[in-house]
Image: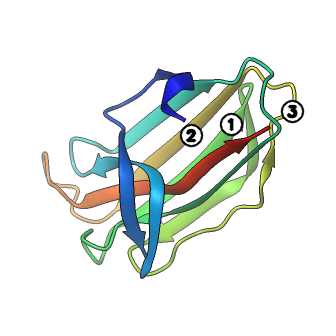
Amino acid sequence: MDEDRTSDGSISSGSVNLAGADFTNSIYTRIGGCKKESDVTYALKGHWREFQTTLGLTSDTDSDAVVYFRIYVDGKQIGEQYRATKFKAALPKPVDVSGAIELKLNMVFAEGDMGLCSNAGYAAWGNAELSR
């Protein structure tokens, strides 16, 4: 998905482990006191049909951390706000992005060590995938 990224908040890509399962094609970002919210936006240009992912916190994240994830298509929130912990990932239904111009993925670090510039771990979109 990197080739269509138009903005980020220090988003990395690679393999992650979410709630005991490995996801090899993922995007993730650090969470903590200085990193309470992050977005990544992709320019879809109407070329994609569907987006799917698993949402969670990596296995090396603090056990008390909670993150809320939201998915936006052309500025409109799709589905609910998804809650994830180190032990429980969220699996949203595939999102129809047919004809969409923009996909925005948002995460908010809601609970855990909120101390100034704490390092609670990583929030991830496991096997984040756009399909035609």
Disc 1 + disc 2, Cβ < 8 Å: yes
Q: Quadrant of the C terminus?
A: top right
For label 2, the SS is strand
Mark linked to residue 13: none
In this rendering, the answer to whether 91 lies above or below 2 is below
Distance, label 2 to label 3, CA atoms, is: 17 Å
Give amino acid for label 3. Ser
For label 3, the SS is loop
Mark linked to residue 72: 1
Which residue is labeled 2 in the image?
105
Using residue 14 as the reference point, say whether residue 99 is left or right of it.
right
In this rendering, the answer to whether 108 lies above or below 102 is below
Which of pointers 2 and 3 lies earlier in the amino acid sequence?
Answer: 3
In this rendering, the answer to whether 119 lies above or below 117 is below
User: In front: 62, or 115?
Assistant: 62
x and y percentages locating residue 37 in the rendered image: 39, 41
